[in-house]
Amino acid sequence: MTLKVLQFGATGQVGQALTAAASDAIELTVLSRAEVDLADPAAIHAAILAADCDLIWNAAAFTMVDTAEAEPEAAFAVNAAAPEAMAQACAERGIAFVHLSTDSVFDGETDRPYVETDAAEPISVYGRSKLAGEQAVLARPKTTVLRVSWVFSPYGRNYVSFMLNLGRTREVLKVVADQYGSPTDGEALAGFMVARAARWASSEPADPAFGLFHFANAGETSRYDFAKAAIARDPLTHARLEPTTQGAFAEAAARPPRSPLDSSKLAATFGFMPQSWKPAVERVADQLVRNGF
Ligand SMILES: NC(=O)c1ccc[n+]([C@@H]2O[C@H](COP(=O)([O-])OP(=O)(O)OC[C@H]3O[C@@H](n4cnc5c(N)ncnc54)[C@H](OP(=O)(O)O)[C@@H]3O)[C@@H](O)[C@H]2O)c1
């Protein structure tokens, strides 16, 4: 019998990667904003109660980090109240729920990659709204939160395609060299979620497959070296990369200066460890270059 999964978020980067990965493995129903607006918790609740599915995952979020500073209510509605409504409705139905969160729940003052038990102290509205969302979700049974960071893929708006574009249009490309993190391969994330869907759907609440996990590619890099690894794959790039600082950009939201994620718990629980970030970035950059971005 094919597993039935309901997905919130159609158009985003991870949403598209999940849809592509699902193919024949699972029967996926995707709800776009036009079908269910995440600002409307009653609509979320009704959609889940009406759904015939074995598992629900949420790929939608208010991801405009700078806009969130001026629109905290909108950010909290989509990033906290909406996943809470999803987890609540799932609990009423006994359905497992998988939600995505972010390294932005951390303040970035660390000398080692973050583990799940480290204190989350967000420094932006986006980070606070995502932390409130993961706490509300994890308070319900049969819920999993995967914290990801610096997601890249062949889909949607993301850092690799953004940098490849700039590489063709700029002479000099100034990239932040004092912000560090672990890029996350969106295709690996989607493949992992599809491959573990049956386990989540069939597990009892006490199963270790539920809970909080970090999911990022192995290793740590700066934004500068991340961009360099992508642009180096494009034979038609014009740009000369120059390192700059985060402080040189006047952005509304503060970013954690160092927020790599340690994915050891994921590896121990699921037997899955994402590969090193650089070959994954090179694979996606090659694919984007082949397809003209
Ligand atoms: N991208 C990253 O680098 C990164 C890093 C850390 C964590 N994450 C987390 O990973 C997850 C997926 O992110 P992503 O990169 O795929 O985001 P994305 O590309 O920005 O996509 C966001 C999705 O959310 C939908 N959405 C936003 N507001 C909505 C609303 N009110 N009602 C219904 N849908 C709404 C968008 O739909 P529309 O197209 O209609 O707006 C879009 O499909 C999120 O939980 C995010 O916090 C991402």
Image: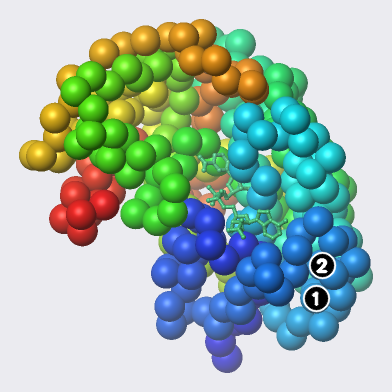
Image coords of residue 179 (percent x, y): 46, 17
Return the residue nearer the eye: 129 or 192.
129
Say whether residue 214 is left or right of residue 87.
Answer: left
Q: Can residue 113 be seen at all in this image of the molecule?
A: yes
Q: Position of residue 208 (x, y in %)?
A: 68, 52
Q: Amino acid at mark 1?
A: Ala
| Residue 65 image point, x, y percent | 63, 33
Identified at 27% across, 21% down, the residue is 173
What residue lies at 49% left-to-right and 15% top-to-bottom?
249
- Report the residue that reaches farthest toward the left: 235
Image-based side of 277 in relation to 246, left or right = left
* Residue for point 64% across, 69% down: 32
Report x, y in % for residue 163. 31, 35
In the image, residue 52 above or below residue 192: below
The residue indicated by pointer 2 is 44
Identify the residue under disc 1: 47
Asked whether, in this view, residue 189 is left or right of residue 210, the answer is left
Q: Height in image: 180 above or below 231?
A: above
